[in-house]
Amino acid sequence: MLLIEEIDNHYLLSLGFSNARISDPEQTLKQLRSVNNQTEVQLVKADLIGGPEHLQFAARNALHSFKGKRRMTNIHAMELLLYISYQRQIAKAISFSGAHSKDSRIAILALSNSKAALEELAREAQSIVGGTPDDDLIEIQSEQRMAKLQRSYGITSRTMEAARFEGEIDSSVLKRLIVERSALLDIQD
């Protein structure tokens, strides 16, 4: 299933791949970006994505930052990575959530004004990264993944319980807390 969402007059493409083979992430990004010049592409560790809501919020904030004085980079895709990772420094964001050569569970994220450009990228992506399309990687699907997300984003079980709305399931609480962490980038100095 192709996941393209409209966000603030742009489109966000999210593609998950298991068993991906990325020997050189920079070269892989160059190949993905060369598919067309209308997309801004980012490769991330799929296991550090807190669901589609996390990506949507990060994309909305990245795009919004370009309208004001809050942007931290000159590239939408890099700004997206900063918001996904909840990091203010590019090197830390790449280290934290950028895909590395040892990562086999990855997500390709792309922003564009053109839905057709994103569809073209989606058609070419598998031949570039290898592996198996697996968009379920975008969602929180297991207790193991939840534990990794909690550790990675510094969210304790106590925080989860304190933030829980009545009847809310664990993955929903965790998604909301990750999104809140990302929102804090705009108010940090």
Image: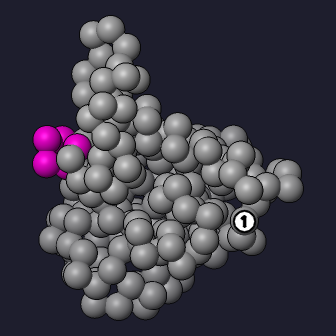
As drawn, is 180 to the left or to the right of 142?
right
Marks counted in the figure total 1
Residue 163 vs residue 56, the one in the foreground? 163
As drawn, is 86 to the left or to the right of 46?
right
Residue 80 belongs to the span the image colors magenta: no
Q: Can I make out residue 57 in this image? A: yes
- Packing grade of label 1 (10 A; few <14, some 14-19, many >=20) is some
Residue at 64% from the left image edge and 51% from the top image edge: 185
Task: Please tell me in which quadrant of the rendered image residue 90 appears.
Answer: bottom right
Colour pattern: one colour
Q: In the image, residue 141 lies at what x, y percent?
A: 18, 41
Q: In the image, residue 59 lies at what x, y percent?
A: 58, 50
Residue at 33% from the left image edge and 65% from the top image edge: 45
Residue 148 vs residue 39, the one in the foreground? 148
Q: Which residues are magenta?
A: 141-146
Three-letter amino acid code at disc 1? Met
- Residue topped by disc 1: 72
As helix, strand or loop, the secondary structure at mark 1 comes to: loop
Residue 146 vs residue 104, the one in the foreground? 146
Q: Can I make out residue 115 in this image? A: no
Q: Quadrant of the C terminus?
A: bottom right
